[in-house]
Image (spheres, helix red, strand yellow):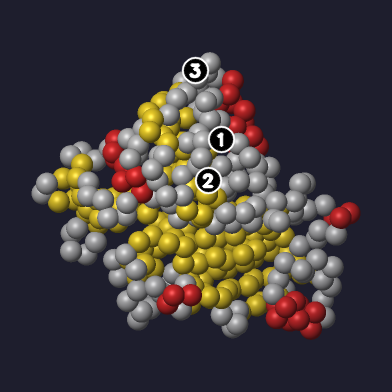
Amino acid sequence: MRFLVPLLVGICVATGSYAQTDIVLKKKAVGDSVLSTTRELILPEPFNGQKALLALFPGRHYNLPGSYKNEMINWSCPRCKVQNYKDVNEDGPAAFPFANGTATRLMNIMDFKDSTGLEYKVISFNHSEFDEDGIQVSRFTGGLLGLAKFVKTDAGWKLRMYAPAIAAYGAFSQCPTPTPIQIGQDQYAFMMRHANGGPGGPFFTDYYMIAGNNGTYQQVMAAFGSEKTQGDPEEGNYSSWTSTYAVPASEKKFFRDVLVTLKGNYDLRDIAGFSTDVQAKMKKAGKKAGKFVLVERYVFKGAKGYELQPDSQLKLN
């Protein structure tokens, strides 16, 4: 099992929401249409992300007072068919909708306009288990991600693509906020940074990309070990690195190659986080330690999604 980073922010959120209100939250039963990927919905102008989420999940809406935003929609669905969704923490699948009810929170609203002038918005939202105190807990449980795309029409904002649940990412039942990235002509995907590691570190970061494919949103890429924090040298942790990602312009119309560039310090006593090919090159260089730049290339392979290619470029100093 890969352990998640005990993020201080997550701890504060989980405990702070308990302390700031004595309200006992309730949930509302909804119909199974909330999970229908073919449902029809048109919202009036101006677009409001929270109202859009409430239209998708018409449960009990709360906006709890406190030092940070804790707004949610609590609902249950007795008639919904329960499905298992992957939790990247490897603690087992997430059975959704949750048996005790679900708390759904808006994460962000992303604005787009394509080359034809078509305007659309994508909202991301996080599902966690319902809690009467509005708490999001469990260090080893990710937040279940959902996405909905609304296109601007003369009649209003029309729901065009809807994935009520994709997979679970992050810690304390809180999914990392997706960031848009252009991967083709008028084609955008959403990248998330998921951090994990054992207690006390070092902590690793993986990248996960979600994109529209075959009529729905789904995970199309996973880049593991893209970052590593400095751990305790007394425990054999000497190497550390950060990373960036980019999608260079190319002749590919859709699903262009993704480059992940790792930069940092390596030590031959601590290179298990690299591929066997990179490890061999580091050993062959003849230096016990140094700086490095590693460029990884991910190529889209249809139903398999993006795959890491064997031609990673390594530069050692």
Residue 53: x and y in percent read: 33, 40
Going by the numbered disc 1, the residue's amino acid type is Gln
Does residue 124 appear in the picture of this structure?
A: no
Upstream in the sequence, badge 1 or badge 3? 3
Dots 1 and 3: beta carbons under 8 Å?
no
**Residue placed most toward the observer, 93 or 16:** 93
Identify the element where label 3 is drawn.
loop
**Residue placed most toward the observer, 239 or 175:** 175
Task: Decide: few, some or many residues near mark 2? Use Cα within 10 Å; few <14, some 14-19, many ≥20.
Answer: many
| Residue ID for mark 1 | 136
Instruction: From the viewer's perspective, tell me whether residue 191 is left or right of residue 57.
Output: right
Please state, as top left, top right, bottom left or bottom right, where the C terminus lies in the image.
bottom right
Dots 1 and 2: beta carbons under 8 Å?
yes
Does residue 131 appear in the picture of this structure?
A: yes
Q: Residue at x 36, y 67 (%)?
A: 213
| Residue ID for mark 2 | 143
Q: Furthest residue to the top?
A: 22
**Residue placed most toward the observer, 271 or 53:** 53
Going by the numbered disc 2, the residue's amino acid type is Gly
Residue 303: x and y in percent read: 44, 75
Instruction: From the viewer's perspective, tell me whether residue 196 is left or right of residue 177.
Output: right
Q: Residue at x 42, y 36 (%)?
A: 76
Going by the numbered disc 3, the residue's amino acid type is Ile
The quarter holding residue 138 reads top right
